[in-house]
Image: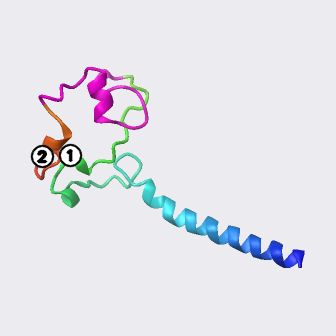
């Protein structure tokens, strides 16, 4: 009886691992870690087509924004890099914004 349980458990873990590996690939898609193709045509040539991953996670170049793995409009506002009265994502997410 214990041997049957171990076999079923092993099969269940294997199936779960395969399912996880098949679904995880979609999570890594983006302009940095993806296939390098432009996403603009899929989103009406909108700036919102990008993944939000930081191009310069070390933050060495100040023109690329603050350091970190992900970008957030709010963190740029808080750091004083952007004035929300001049520009915000709501203005940029319409088609043709690039």
Q: Residue 75 magenta-drawn?
A: yes
| Near-viewer residue (93 or 85) | 85
Q: Residue at x 44, y 55 (%)?
A: 27
Q: Residues within 10 Å of mark 1 (few under 14, many from 20)?
A: some
Boundaries of the magenta span = 61-86
Q: Secondary structure at mark 1?
A: helix
Q: Residue 85 magenta-drawn?
A: yes
Report the side of 31 relative to 47 (left or right). Answer: right
The quadrant of the image that shows the N terminus is bottom right
Report the side of 4 relative to 40 (left or right). Answer: right
The quadrant of the image that shows the C terminus is top left
Q: Secondary structure at mark 2?
A: loop
Task: Residue 97: give its label.
Answer: 2
| Near-viewer residue (89 or 34) | 89
Tell me residue 23's x, y (percent).
49, 64
Rendered image coloring scheme: rainbow
Tell me residue 69's x, y (percent).
43, 36
Report the side of 74 relative to 60 (left or right). Answer: left
Tell me residue 37's x, y (percent).
30, 55
Q: Residues within 10 Å of mark 2 (few under 14, many from 20)?
A: few
Label 2 vs 1, first from the N-terminus:
1
Q: Is residue 60 above or below residue 13?
A: above
Q: Dominant secondary structure of the magenta stretch? A: loop
> Which residue is disc 1 drawn over?
47
Q: Quadrant of residue 71?
A: top left
Q: CA distance from mark 2 to mark 1?
A: 6 Å
* Tally of numbered discs: 2
Q: Residue at x 44, y 53 (%)?
A: 28
Tell me residue 59's x, y (percent).
39, 25
Q: Is residue 42 above or below residue 74?
A: below
| Near-viewer residue (13 or 22) | 13
Report the side of 41 relative to 74 (left or right). Answer: left
């Amino acid at each position: 009886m214990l041997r049957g349980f171990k076999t079923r458990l092993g099969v269940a873990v294997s199936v779960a691992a395969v399912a996880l590996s098949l679904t995880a690939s979609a999570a890594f898609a983006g302009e940095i870690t993806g296939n390098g193709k432009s996403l603009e045509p899929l989103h009406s040539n909108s700036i919102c087509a990008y993944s939000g991953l930081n191009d310069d996670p070390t933050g060495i170049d100040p023109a690329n924004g603050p350091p970190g793995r992900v970008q957030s409009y709010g963190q740029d506002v808080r750091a004083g890099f952007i004035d929300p009265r001049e520009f915000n994502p709501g203005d940029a997410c319409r088609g043709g914004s690039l």
